[in-house]
């Protein structure tokens, strides 16, 4: 699980450093900095939920795997929708920068999520192909 979090953590740390530098040089406003930070936090929460669901269901049956991952997708979307709505409604942020950053990070994390599932599914297939050749 920790190995799957390396890329998102490095990405978020780099974003935080760049935003801090831009804010300290007064190239971006505090509202823009807050907007980007909130978008990063919400995207990362969604990714953490995904990692938890995948780690729990990867060794289970196909039915359980599909139930947790495909069933978890609408739950994650509802959680993200509520968090985005609450952020836009109650916090003082720039909505356009928040939505743009959130969408960009959502797409990046989604591509990474697909890659994680692909790699986890391919490993058992390669192992089973290797054992079939040994048996014959």
Image: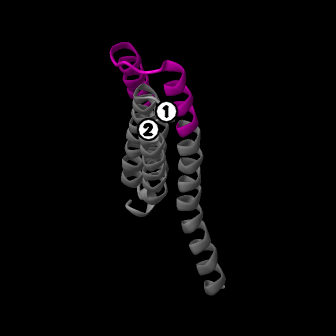
The answer to whether the residue labelled 1 contacts the one labelled 2, judged by CB atoms less than 8 Å apart, is: yes
Q: Say which label, 1 or 2, has the lower sequence index.
A: 2
* Residue at 66% from the left image edge and 82% from the top image edge: 133
Tell me, yes or no, whether the highlighted magenta stretch contains residue 108.
no
**Element at label 1:** loop
Q: Nearer the viewer, residue 126 or 25?
A: 25
Find residue 32 and report its horizontal and vertical position in percent. Answer: 46, 28
What residue is pinned by disc 2? 23
Find residue 69 and report its horizontal and vertical position in percent. Answer: 46, 42
Tell me, yes or no, whether the highlighted magenta stretch contains residue 103.
yes
Q: Is residue 20 left or right of residue 121?
A: left
Magenta-drawn segment: 76-105
What residue is pinned by disc 1? 28
Outermost residue, top direction?
89
Find residue 86 and report its horizontal and vertical position in percent. Answer: 35, 18
Residue 119, relative to residue 64: is it above or below? below
Looking at the figure, which quarter contains the N terminus? bottom left
Find residue 51 and report its horizontal and vertical position in percent. Answer: 41, 49
Residue 64 occupies quadrant: top left
């Amino acid at each position: 699980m920790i190995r799957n979090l390396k890329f998102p953590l490095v990405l978020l740390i780099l974003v935080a450093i760049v935003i801090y530098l831009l804010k300290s040089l007064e190239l971006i406003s505090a509202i823009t900095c807050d907007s980007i930070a909130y978008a990063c936090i919400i995207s990362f929460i969604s990714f953490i939920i995904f990692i938890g669901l995948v780690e729990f269901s990867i060794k289970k049956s196909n039915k359980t795997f599909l139930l947790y991952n495909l069933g978890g997708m609408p739950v994650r979307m509802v959680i993200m929708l509520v968090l985005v709505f609450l952020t836009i409604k109650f916090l003082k942020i720039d909505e356009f920068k928040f939505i743009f950053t959130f969408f960009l990070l959502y797409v990046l994390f989604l591509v990474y999520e697909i890659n994680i599932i692909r790699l986890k599914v391919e490993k058992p297939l390669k192992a089973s192909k290797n054992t079939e050749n040994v048996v014959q």
